[in-house]
Image: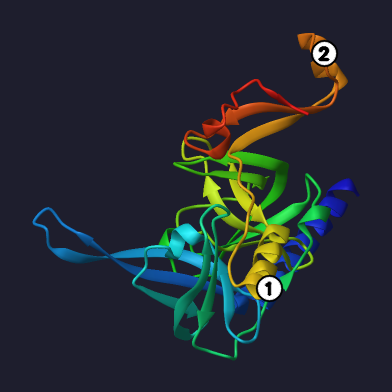
Amino acid sequence: MEKSIKNNFLKNLSSEITELVQSISESVANIVTTSLTMDAFLRVVPVRGVGSAFVISEEGYLVTNSHVVASAESITLLIGDQTLQARILSLDPSRDIALLKAESRKLKPIKLGDSDKVNIGEFVLAIGSPLGLRGPNVSLGVVSAKGRAIEGEGFILEDLIQTDAAINPGNSGGPLVNMDGEVIGVTTAIIPFAQGIGFAIPINTVKRFIEMISKYGRPIRAYIGVITTPLNEQIAGYYGLPVREGLIVLRVLRGSPADQYGIREGDIIT
């Protein structure tokens, strides 16, 4: 009986995932970019890049990562059997988000969810074009953690969703989808020396970005350049701190406003 229940559960889950992928596959695009660089003989040569994106409106607006398209001279989208050209409407490297506009006005948008309601342990699908393969390609995983932060060269990405769904080069910019077919995040990065650790930008961050573009014409962000963790009574008591509320500075990004004003690791902000 127990084995039968387990088999039925797996069959139902498999059918649900199959139907889900079929319903949203037309909303996910492969990105092929062409950038220009100089070779060893100082000749300008084209360089091909790949990534993923997803449609957010019938008018042809798509979301991807800024690092996928920031240096692109041309952007080609492969959606189903369509090959379309796109242009950049806005970039925000500090959030690693880009808004694109495709030449087509007949695209199928994907439903956007609420990343504030994401629960650790829930099933998710990472959809995109890993390694530049014509997609969409799908991997299944769970939400491993929330509120993660990672540091790159000159930037910090904060409040990320961590997942163990396989994310490979070329997946960047693709949607992280829940079992209701809603986008809860934009896949953005992996830890190359670790397995099962990938990150996604919460979709609510993307929504705020789009609202700012609509209202101000550009992204606006207050930037400090620190990674912090909340201070509580247990931590304060362990280290003998005189305060019980605030934030402990874990890391300061070199050259950031916080660094310039003398904020250092271990400082307490109240």
In terms of depth relative to the viewer, which is nearer, 192 or 44? 44
In terms of depth relative to the viewer, which is nearer, 21 or 248? 248
Horizontal arrangement in the rendering, residue 137 relative to residue 161 (left or right): left
Horizontal arrangement in the rendering, residue 236 relative to residue 191 (left or right): right
Count residues near mark 1 (Cα–Cα under 10 Å), then give few for <14, some for 14-19, many for 20+.
few
Question: x, y (%) of residue 256?
Answer: 52, 38
Count residues near mark 2 (Cα–Cα under 10 Å), then give few for <14, some for 14-19, many for 20+.
few
Question: x, y (%) of residue 30?
Answer: 48, 71
Query: Residue at point 61% right, 35% down?
Result: 226
N-terminal label among 2 and 1: 1
Judging by the rendered image, the residue that carries numbered circle 2 is 242
Residue type at mark 2 is Pro
Residue type at mark 1 is Lys
Quarter occupied by the C terminus: top right
Separation of marks 2 and 1 at Cα, in angstroms: 43 Å
Q: Residue furthest right?
A: 1
Question: x, y (%) of residue 134?
Answer: 45, 71
From the viewer's perspective, is residue 108 above or below residue 217?
below
Task: Kindly identify which numbered label has been placed on residue 215.
Answer: 1
In terms of depth relative to the viewer, which is nearer, 141 or 246? 246
Query: Residue at point 59% right, 29% down?
Result: 251
In terms of depth relative to the viewer, which is nearer, 7 or 172? 172
Question: Is residue 163 something that shows in the picture?
Answer: no
Question: Is residue 257 something that shows in the picture?
Answer: yes
Question: x, y (%) of residue 23?
Answer: 69, 77
